[in-house]
Amino acid sequence: MDNAGRSRLALRGRGASFLRRLRAHAWLREKRAITLLVLLSCVFLIITALVRWTPLLEVDWPVTMAVQRHRSGLLDALAGAATYLGNTAPLLVTAFAGAVLLLALRKRWAALLCLATGLGLPLNMILKLLVDRARPDPQMVAVIQPVGGLSFPSGHAMVSVLCYGFLAVMAWVHIEERRRRILIVASLALLAFCIGVSRVYLGAHWFSDVAGGWTAGLFFLLLWTQLYRRVGKDELGRPPVVPPAAER
């Protein structure tokens, strides 16, 4: 065999080795995702079990007192604004707007899954009915914004993590400019965090309700992300298509 033949064989060998490592790495990432899903499920089940345990109030009550300690008109307004962004209507409008934008960029699977984040609302209602936990007692904490219904897990916390979190993931994988990508992802993550904290500040939820909502939201966000990795393979790695109007 001449030198050219040996070079071709060596190149094929390196290519095959690279593909094996790539497949192994993808498998490892999938295993990590499954492990994290199981871990989040366990954490959620533990919190769910503890909400029926009266001593949990010895943790929840001091947290609410600490959050409400420096109450002011400005903080009331900021908390009200944050909690508004976690309401049903703004979340659905955000999911729809995100889907339209992703569709304009020819990310059809991403757009569909973005719309599907709205399913977090009925999923949260099912979880609330199963747990059947009452809202914080006005005699124990200041209920700044009275609200009816059940308490665990916090729907604002759960669906905000799912909706804004999915948009953050899409920004992370589809925006090439590093600084803009980090700014958008950090802003969306901070928004979801502030929405959860606002529910404690306003006396609408105990901290354990919000922690359960964050955990459930992360579970479904990871589920959505893994689903996108499977069905949206063609979109991953494909640069966004800028609409003609934007080019002008």
Image (cartoon, helix red, strand yellow):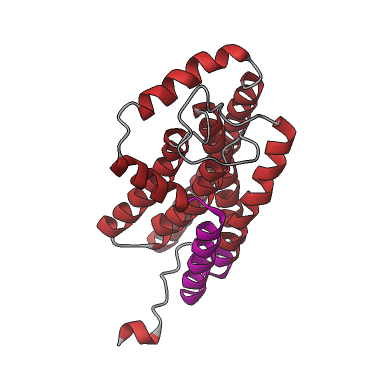
Residue 233 visible here:
no
Residue found at the far right of this picture: 130
Q: For this view, does 123 lie left or right of residue 143?
A: right
Residue in the picture at 53% in, 27% down: 208
Residue in the picture at 50% in, 48% down: 160
Q: How far across and down, in percent of the image, does residue 178 sit?
A: 28, 56
Prevailing secondary structure of the magenta residues: helix
Q: Quadrant of residue 170?
A: bottom left
Q: Quadrant of residue 30?
A: top right
Q: Is residue 79 magenta?
A: no
Q: Is residue 86 magenta?
A: yes
Residue in the picture at 70% in, 31% down: 131
Vertical placement of residue 112 versus 58, above or below: below
Residue 97 visible here:
yes
Q: How far across and down, in percent of the image, does residue 22 sit?
A: 50, 48
The region drawn magenta spans: 85-111
Q: 123 or 205, which is in the foreground?
A: 205
Residue in the picture at 36% in, 42% down: 76
Vertical placement of residue 58 versus 24, above or below: above
Q: For this view, does 188 lie left or right of residue 51?
A: left
Q: 21 or 112, which is in the foreground?
A: 112
Q: How far across and down, in percent of the image, does residue 149 sit?
A: 65, 40
